[in-house]
Amino acid sequence: MQNNDNNAQVIRVMLAKIGLDGHDRGIKVVARALRDAGMDVVYTGLHRTPEEVVDAAIQEDVDILGISLLSGAHMHIFPKVLDLLKAKEAEDMIVAGGGVIPDNDVKELYEMGVHKILLQDTPPQEIIDSFRQLVAERGAR
Amino acid sequence: MINRIPSMELAKRVRDGHLRAIARLITRVESGGDPDVREALAELYKSTGNAHVVGITGVPGAGKSTLVTQLVHEYRASGRTVGVVAIDPSSPFSGGAILGDRIRMGDLVSDPGVFIRSMATRGTLGGLARPALDAVDLLDAGGFDVVLIETVGVGQDEVDIVRAAHTTVVVNAPGLGDDIQAIKAGVLEIADVHVVSKADRPDSNRTIQELKAMLMMSLEPGKDVWRVPVVPTSSEKHTGFGELMAAIDNHAEHLERSGEITERRRQIALTRVVKVAEEIVRDNFVRDSRSQTEELLKKVTQRELDPHGAAVTLLKAMKETIHEQD
């Protein structure tokens, strides 16, 4: 038998790359780290639209939608994603962001409703811990 | 904390084809547990049995995800809605999984007639976890005309899929010529439709011929015998997927015409019941009777009791403790 408990709640995460951003080394490292922490990770691949990602995240019913952005388009893409989630009555989804994002923008993104921003130097364990905490705080769904 | 919608309420929405309700119920089914989920599934089960369930299997890298994507496009063009359950392996060490089928299916989203769900094997025997079959029910009850199950690569899984699907498609890739020899005992027998993917490659003809030659040998004489077709496909050139859909449709017609569908349905029911029973037994071993289990294991290791005797003792003890909600 595997060493995972059948009834343990497995955290589901979607990791997404949106727009013209081809940097996927980081997101793949994060995917691997989350997998090794026992989470199910759905990776979208590169160059998705916000609509595609939100629809996929709803069908996959992930706990956390993590978006990696190194293109500088974060102030455009996050509001779009949050609006789409609201329009599709999926505001209970936790949205996290990672990548290269200036401090001023981080503050604004939090105000906008992004739950967690993890910048490029974040150690994998911190990402794992904060994801677990976010899901625990949200509670059963 | 968020507002938790009761599963029975979600079940009502599933019948109306509400995608978010289907998605949430699959999540609850996957995380096991709540009695109200089982109640909802029992209720929804009455509304299943309308979808044609197609299993897609083959060696890793054969092109299953790509093929599923193209096949879904064909079904959509023919006016049918499609649910997809895409299964990827869990890590045997952490239990986690990277579900990558979405990468190749990216262009299918944002079409309400398509629903794709990725699931991990969770280390189940045979690779086709019980929740995956429940997910098929949910998509069926949600009104999808066709449900495709994409399995993990080669292993015991193929044998599992044939007992869970109405039509089993085996995807073969060219260049693995000798592998056909190696896997023919398992894979050749379970296919209702064979696909040779990457048919734009020069060596694909050889694979097609080899498959056809082997299928000839196993042909039984008779009028209503299904003759397993070999369909070459190429996603590079966008060819063969219409033919593949037609082959699956032909097989569905054959099942109805010959009456074989009754036996398939029986087979599927048997698989489902056995899988749930196995799960109940396994959970009970772990949960309710831990102390007794340990004691028996000790006796087995010390050769005081044989494994069969220990299993019978445990099952007898379990009979007392099993409750309906398990």
Image (cartoon, coloured by chain):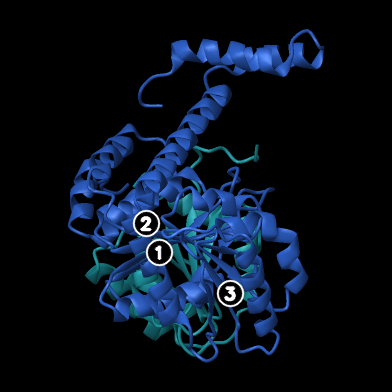
Chain colours: A cyan, B blue
> Is disc 2 in the same subunit as disc 1?
yes
Does the CB distance between marks 3 and 1 fall below 8 Å? no
Circle 1 Cα neighbour tier, 10 Å, few/some/many (<14 / 14–19 / ≥20) = many
Tell me what residue is drawn at x 30 percent, y 81 percent: B77
Residue A121 visible to an observer of this rendering? no
Picture quarter with the C terminus of chain B: top left
Whether B170 is drawn above or below B140: the answer is below
Q: Are marks 2 and 1 in contact (CB under 8 Å)?
A: yes
In 3D space, how far apart are the residues under numbered discs 2 and 3 (Cα atoms)? 27 Å
Residue A10 bears which disc, if any?
Answer: none
Q: Which residue is mark 2?
A: B255
Looking at the picture, how far across and down is residue A129, in whole percent?
A: 57, 53
Residue B63 tag number: 3
Observer-nearest residue: B252 or B86?
A: B252
Mark in front: 2 vs 3: 2
Lower position in the chain sequence, tag 3 or tag 1:
3
At label 3, counting other C-alpha atoms closer than 10 Å, the crowd grade (few under 14, some 14-19, many 20 or more) is: many
Residue named by callout 1: B251
Against B171, residue B2 (above or below) is above
Kind of element beneath mark 3: loop
Instruction: Count all numbered tags in the image, as a single digit.
Output: 3
Determine the image quadrant of residue B71.
Answer: bottom left
Q: Which chain's residue wears label 2?
A: B
Taking depth in this image into account, of B83 and B216 the one nearest to the observer is B216
Are marks 2 and 3 in one subunit? yes
Q: Is residue B214 above or below residue B207?
A: above
**Label 3 is found on which chain of the structure?**
B
* Residue type at the position of mark 1: His
Towards the viewer: B97 or B50: B50
Q: Amino acid at mark 2?
A: Leu
CA–CA distance in space, label 2 to label 1: 6 Å
